[in-house]
Amino acid sequence: MALSEFEIKRIEKAGTVFLSEHRPPPEIRSKLDIGWRLENQSVYIFETRPIWNEPSQYHDLDIAKATFVLKHGVWKIYWMKRDLKWHSYEPKSQVKTIEQVFKVVTEDQYGCFFG
């Protein structure tokens, strides 16, 4: 089941607030930036950097993922480990709201998202 329009608007608002508080200064965004995207039931937070051997091209590196589980009414939070697989984020693997997802990523208690 897809997210409702209301839920999508809530995600967009929370994502906008997150970016307004956490994006790097404009003068370095060509070298490092962050963003988020919504795919189906999941929100991805990613870094954007130039490709090292082709600086005019950029690539996105996913650093956090939150998937909404409608049956339980929770967002499950994951981080990308060096094996390039998603792992449940401990100490807080699930939360009730998208705002809490962005808060957990911001706090990054164990340095999993932003190292």
Image: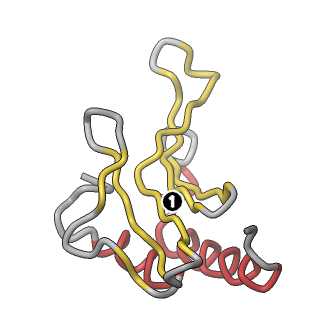
From the image, tell me which residue sits under label 1.
Answer: 25
Up the image or down, 62 lies above or below 1; here it is: above
Q: Is residue 23 left or right of residue 6?
A: left
Residue at image x 32%, y 56%? Answer: 113
The residue sitting at the right extreme is 5
Q: Is residue 30 left or right of residue 108?
A: right
Q: Position of residue 30 (x, y in %)?
A: 57, 40
Residue at image x 31%, y 71%? Answer: 93
Up the image or down, 98 lies above or below 1; here it is: below
User: Which quarter of the image is occupied by the N terminus?
Assistant: bottom right
Residue at image x 56%, y 14%? Answer: 54
Q: Position of residue 40 (x, y in %)?
A: 69, 58
Q: Which of 60 and 97 lies nearest the eye of the viewer?
A: 97
The residue sitting at the front extreme is 71
Q: How is the image coloured?
A: secondary structure
The residue tagged with tag 1: helix, strand or loop? loop
Up the image or down, 45 lies above or below 7; here it is: above
Residue at image x 78%, y 79%? Answer: 4
Q: Which of 70 and 102 lies nearest the eye of the viewer?
A: 70
The local crowd at label 1, few if under 14, some if 14 to 19, many if 20 or more residues have their Cα within 10 Å, is: few
Quarter residue 81 falls in: top left
The residue sitting at the top extreme is 53
Task: Kindly identify the amino acid type of the residue bearing the numbered disc 1.
Answer: Pro
Q: Position of residue 59 (x, y in %)?
A: 56, 31
**Number of on-image labels:** 1
